[in-house]
Image (cartoon, rainbow, N blue to C red):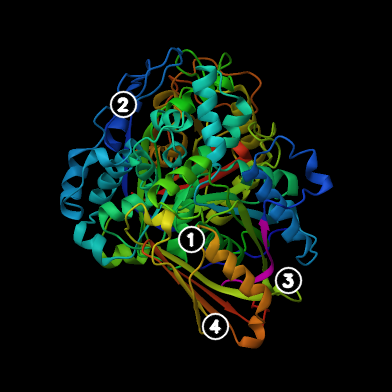
Amino acid sequence: MTISHISDSLMSPVAITGLGAIAAGGNDAAELWRSLAAGVVRCGPVPEYLFKTILNFPVFAAPQNCLSDRARALLAETCPDFQPESVSRTILLAVTAAAEALQQAGIDATDLRRLRVGVALGTTVGCTFHNEEYYIAWRDNLTPDLAPVHYYLGGNVAASLQRLLGIRGPSAVVTNACASGTDAIGIGRNWLAAGQCDLVIAGGADELSRVAYNGFASLMLADTVACRPFSHDRQGLNLGEGAGVLVMERQESVATRGGKVLGRVRGYGCAADAHHPTAPHPEGRGLKTALAQALREAGEGDIVYVNAHGTGTKANDQAETAALAAALPGAGAAAIVSTKGFTGHTLGAAGGLEAIFTLLALRDGFTPGTVGCAELDPGFAVCPLLQNAGRNLPGLLGLSQSLAFGGGNSVLVLEAVL
Amino acid sequence: MSHLVAVTSVLRLSMDHEVPAQLARELRRADDFIRLAVVAGFNALATAPLRELAPEARGVFVGTAFGPLETNFQSLGSLINDGEGQISPTLFSHSVYNAAAGYTARLLDFRGPALTVTDYGYPFLIALAEARLAVAAGRVERALVLGVEVYSELLADAYRRSFAGCEIPWHKGAVAWVLDRAGAVDSCLARLEAVTVTGAPCVTGDYLTRAGEICRAAGREMVPARHALAAVEGLTDLLKTLPVSAAGGLDWECSASFANAAVRLAGGPFKSTYG
């Protein structure tokens, strides 16, 4: 049987009114977009301000000071006693992106207190306990100071944003591995459509961590040079860090307050491969289901742009192109790109950042090519754009999609509003 | 218009459970977090109404406060003991929070949404709320909702040192609920009408002590055991024992320093416009 009739009221598009981002390539969404268009690649050894390593897998690190002046100004109003060192780097990245998105949406501290504000954020590293000093001391039967335990308990990124910004409403930290940010946006869309809140801050944030860095190394999924998504000679991913956050509202709310709509979430799909603990289904089984669901929700319109997951691993890029060829009508005509050659794989942040790149490309009517891809893998069923093959976009509808450990697949259909 | 949502099976699982023979091989390398999720899901489905559903019409929703914390520490230990680049790939992949949802989806053949949410307050209820929306919207026909906690020895030590003389209040365990589109089943435990969770700022220690937590239902107040699954274990027991339909519905509320939660359960009718 097929999935039954989809309820209209719970599927209605929601408006995007603010974008905020930070990653290796820039400190805000506009700078990131300019750097991406210019082909800037800030990929290098792990900086000492993050952690020390003897491994030689390069990363895309955000600046050491990742709390923007804009975020500090907002926090001065909403949480005057805030001390940056009291929270994780993941939370600082999230606050920086959220402050930018809220400012663009025209939402100030008074609005945040007045409205029912939902927070849905994806993360992977941001929810774990990785304090090695504490762990070693505890393992050696010592009694280390409990501060790291309380730091961990205070580290839920959505709850932290609620506390720091003085907001009340539904909150969720989505821990769907590399698809977390995409799912968080989908969940935020669902809350708005169901009337559970007036405004949603949604996306993802993740810092670079030594455990994740070593984990990907041990899985032999990391490349020793800058990654080359979709390339015939790709050897794996590079980890990155950052945050990408959208502000979303119901369309009628934006009209009432005289806000500006940048775009819309038209559809969301999420489906499991049910295939393997870490590897994607070779034909992208779950991704095809997620694509079909998101496109069904979105209704009519041609997809002209696809921001693919495109990690640069052999298995991901093969599965993803196979699924696009099978499940996306007109896939051959769409501009398919990966932006991970520009950001690295930012794990829980990736879905948020890539949704923003999707919207910016659609609003500009132009996409740069896939950074790092000079020659395509000839085995693909569709042809992503090469690095120097930027292209004008003849429409306003695009996809942002994510694949994850555990076989998760998530897809957003986004529409630019000019 | 949205579909009515029925609760068709609920259960609690503790660590003394038996692993069903048909799952034993696939779970031999799984950690407790994954094993609890899969077995709780399997057992809950065994008592849910039989439905012929496409795998894509079934979704898994997992909520957890602490995730696979013990595996997280084993992974950290592997890095410290074995050196850089030597973390066990299995340990690392199992330390990712959605590993349990992935295993459950694979072993029970659920190919709709597989979502994991993390929250120190009421993670199961957040997952339940997302699952209810998914069924109500028609994105899935059936949702398996799991709350799983395994805690860790490190956390237990921190608790003992913080609250001298107190027994560790938690245990490894899981809660599983099955939700179905109400119009598609002949009977159910109750209709799930609403789930809300609103977080509130608190001091971090409150997440361990569950400060001020009180549940109210059917005219009674109850202080649950001091752990992240306790309140929903109580709600699960209530749902198994109380004839919601005969009682004309059940409003369950839980308040604590860190969050307020409410669940509205109702009796029939179960058929909706789209039913």
Q: Is residue A311 visible?
A: no
The residue labelled by disc 4 is B218
Residue placed most toward the observer, A344 or B115? B115
> Residue B226: which disc?
1
Q: Quadrant of residue A218?
A: top right
Question: Which three-letter amino acid code belongs to the residue tagged 2?
Answer: Ser
Asked if badges 2 and 3 are on one and the same chain, I answer no
Q: Residues within 10 Å of mark 1 (few under 14, many from 20)?
A: some
Foreground label between 2 and 3? 3
Task: Report, in whole angstroms, how far the alpha carbon at label 4 lies from the one at label 1.
Answer: 21 Å
Is B2 covered by the magenta stretch? yes
Task: Report, in whole angstroms, how far the alpha carbon at label 2 lies from the one at label 4.
Answer: 60 Å
Q: In the image, what residue occupies the spot 61% across and 41% down?
A: B99
Q: Residues within 10 Å of mark 4 (few under 14, many from 20)?
A: few
Q: Position of residue B26 (x, y in %)?
A: 76, 39
- Per the rendered image, the range of residues in magenta is B1-13
Q: In the image, what residue occupies the spot 40% across and 66% down?
A: B256
Residue placed most toward the observer, A165 or A332? A165
The residue labelled by disc 3 is B184
The quarter in which the N terminus of chain B is drawn is bottom right
The residue labelled by disc 2 is A35
The quarter in which the C terminus of chain B is drawn is bottom right
